[in-house]
Image (cartoon, coloured by chain):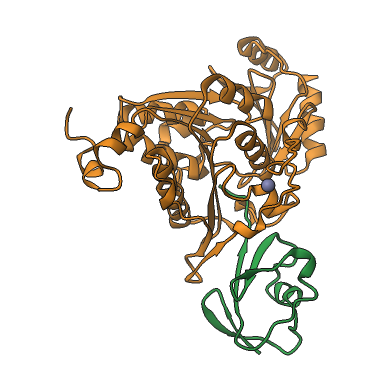
Chain colours: A orange, B green
Amino acid sequence: MNERYSRQQLFAPIGKDGQEKISKKHVLLIGAGALGTGNAEALVRAGIGKLTIIDRDYVEWSNLQRQQLYSEEDAKERLPKAIAAKQRLEQINSDVTVAAIVGDATAQELETIVKEQHPNLLIDATDNFETRMIINDVSNKYRIPWIYGACVGSYGISYAFVPGKTPCLHCLLETVPVGGLTCDTAGIISPAVQMVVAYQVAEALKILVEDWQSLRNKLVSFDLWKNQHVAIRVDQVKKDDCPSCGTHPTYPYLSYDMQTKTAVLCGRNSVQIRPAAKREYDLRELAQLFSKQGLQVETNPYLVSVSLGEHRLVVFQDGRALVHGTKDIQEAKTLYYRYLG
Amino acid sequence: MELIINGESIQLPDSVKTVSDLLSHFRLNHKIAIVEVNLNIIQKQEYETTTLCNGDKVEIVHFVGGG
Ligand SMILES: [Zn+2]
């Protein structure tokens, strides 16, 4: 045993026993953007047993300002974030098993991972409420805690949800927020990211060492530019008739996604399209098909990127695509169907 | 009226009488927020009927999606 975790073990609430527990835990991280890379690096350095990362996106130049695991090389190669993160994390701590999934965090995908691998904790690092409601239902159905985190501009918010103990996200929100500020319109500064990551990782460590009594139990938010800090006890918001955590749960968000889905991506002038049924593309064949039409194509083992005037279409092996250069879902769909059928 | 909002003393125009008015004033009425007045969380259906008094301690947390 070397000195790697000595300072963390000296911290009394963790100690040797805590470190032992941490080293056996599996965390499922949903999203590998700003919050995802921050959480991933901290947990891997802390020496968890296994980290599974699921992310649908690839690295771009605009990510490098705050997404701490990525390099210029990753952006040049348009490497999928899950893959680039795994590579960097394995350099940081080879003790930790890192699994990368390049794909969308659908209800089906998340349920499959949870049923097969029984992670001890889910960490939210997504950029949309649709996925968070799915995480919330998975958390309640399989009794696994999850930690919400989000940030925009200089503002951030976090809460640790524990099934059977705290209210759930569905109790707090009642409906899924639509629109509102995103990184697209309000931007984001890295200290807001780091602050949310700090709140998330602190609660994660408490959960991983099973120190449940030390959980914050408050919904916390801050604005680093307006110099505000708020923490609210939300226990009283728990609803007995909540469809996700109440006495007769139906987990509504686990049955929603059997259709073609579109999403405008946070911080990007882009739309994602996911076909109803998974497709299996031979990416080399697809690249050739586009080249023959005289289109400018770039490719790597995970995706094909084709320029279409002011738009760019990026296709992944499973048929999922990103249409860049638009926020208009209809326009994006038109391009998708025109080139991919 | 003067309220303590998120720890700061803030002077509000007379038009702000209820929680609902307060959220509109801060342009948070279209966002999903948790509002606590003097340590009690106010249910959404009570925003319009919950009146605020001088010196009330109000905490507002609004949900955002970015990450
Ligand atoms: Zn609930």
Q: Residue furthest left?
A: A2
Estimate the x, y position of residue A196 in percent, counting from the top left: 47, 53
Position of residue A12 in the picture relative to residue A156 (left or right): left
The residue lying at 72 percent from left, 32 percent from top is A254
Position of residue A197 in the picture relative to residue A300 (left or right): left
Please determine whether, in this image, residue B34 is positioned above or below residue A91. Answer: below
Q: Can I make out residue B53 in this image?
A: yes
Name which quarter of the figure residue A290 lies in. top right
Q: Nearer the viewer, residue A27 or A325?
A: A27
Position of residue A184 in the picture relative to residue A252 (left or right): left
Position of residue A36 in the picture relative to residue A211 (left or right): right
Q: Quadrant of the N terminus of chain A?
A: top left
Estimate the x, y position of residue A103 in percent, counting from the top left: 60, 26
The residue lying at 73 percent from left, 90 percent from top is B14
Q: Quadrant of the C terminus of chain A?
A: top right
Q: Can I make out residue A124 in this image?
A: no
The residue lying at 59 percent from left, 49 percent from top is B66
Q: Nearer the viewer, residue A140 or A57?
A: A140
